[in-house]
Image: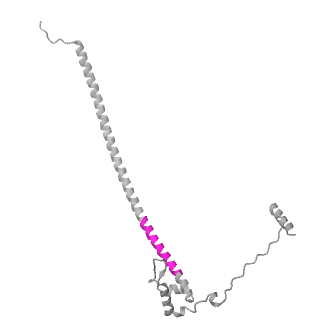
Amino acid sequence: MSEENPVDPNMVRELERARADIKAIRAELKDAHADVDRARKERDGFKGQLETQKNAFEAQLAEAKTASEKATADHEAALTQLKTAGERAVMEAQAETLATRLGAHNPADVVRLVDLSAVKRGEDGKFEGLTEALEAAKTERAYLFGEPPKTGAEQGRTITAPAPKPGASEPVNARTMDGKDYEAQKRQFLASK
């Protein structure tokens, strides 16, 4: 007897099951590949969105930095202008005071006519050259100045204004007065007698 490969019926069944399992695994693998491809496409889409958002945010940041730098520069310019105007106002006020002491008829006009460009503020806060500029104006434009005013101490009289006098009291109407005020007025009246 020659033995040929006998076909085992279980083996055929096992092969068919293995083929079915392979087909199922291939289908699952195909689905997994599709899922991976879909995930890659979503990832690429998210990357594109992130890149777009990043560019937009960077543009907004650049605009904000530019606006901030411009605002800082404007602030510095305004602050410098304000300081200069303040310094000028203080210098003019001191110049008017000095012009009054020198006997100027109209100190504000004298200050407007005098060249104060050479006057500078020293480290001690005082204006250097202000007295010299006004004294030079007094010699050059004597018609703007008169005799300096003398103080009361220099004139020998120091008269002060009289002390204020109390005002007259208004008549009291007891009919329209509040009850507490009426009682207070009544006690005060009775205490004075």
Q: Can residue 153 be seen in this view?
A: yes
Q: Is residue 175 rendered magenta in the image? A: no
Q: Quadrant of residue 25?
A: top left
Q: How is the image coloured?
A: one colour
Q: In which quarter of the image is the N terminus?
A: top left
- The residue drawn where x is 30% and y is 34% is 34
Residue 47 lies, in percent from the top left, at 33, 46
The answer to which of 151 and 179 lies nearer the viewer is 151
Question: What range is drawn magenta here?
Answer: 71-93
Q: Is residue 75 rendered magenta in the image? A: yes
- The residue drawn where x is 64% and y is 90% is 155
161 vs 179, left or right, is left
174 vs 48, left or right, is right
Residue 127 lies, in percent from the top left, at 48, 81
The relative height of residue 192 versus residue 147 in the rendered view (above or below) is above
Q: Main secondary structure of the magenta part?
A: helix
Residue 12 lies, in percent from the top left, at 23, 16
Q: Residue furthest top?
A: 1
Q: Is residue 108 visible?
A: no
The relative height of residue 28 versus residue 156 in the rendered view (above or below) is above
- The residue drawn where x is 26% and y is 24% is 22
Q: In which quarter of the image is the C terminus?
A: bottom right
The answer to which of 42 and 192 lies nearer the viewer is 192
Residue 6 lies, in percent from the top left, at 17, 11
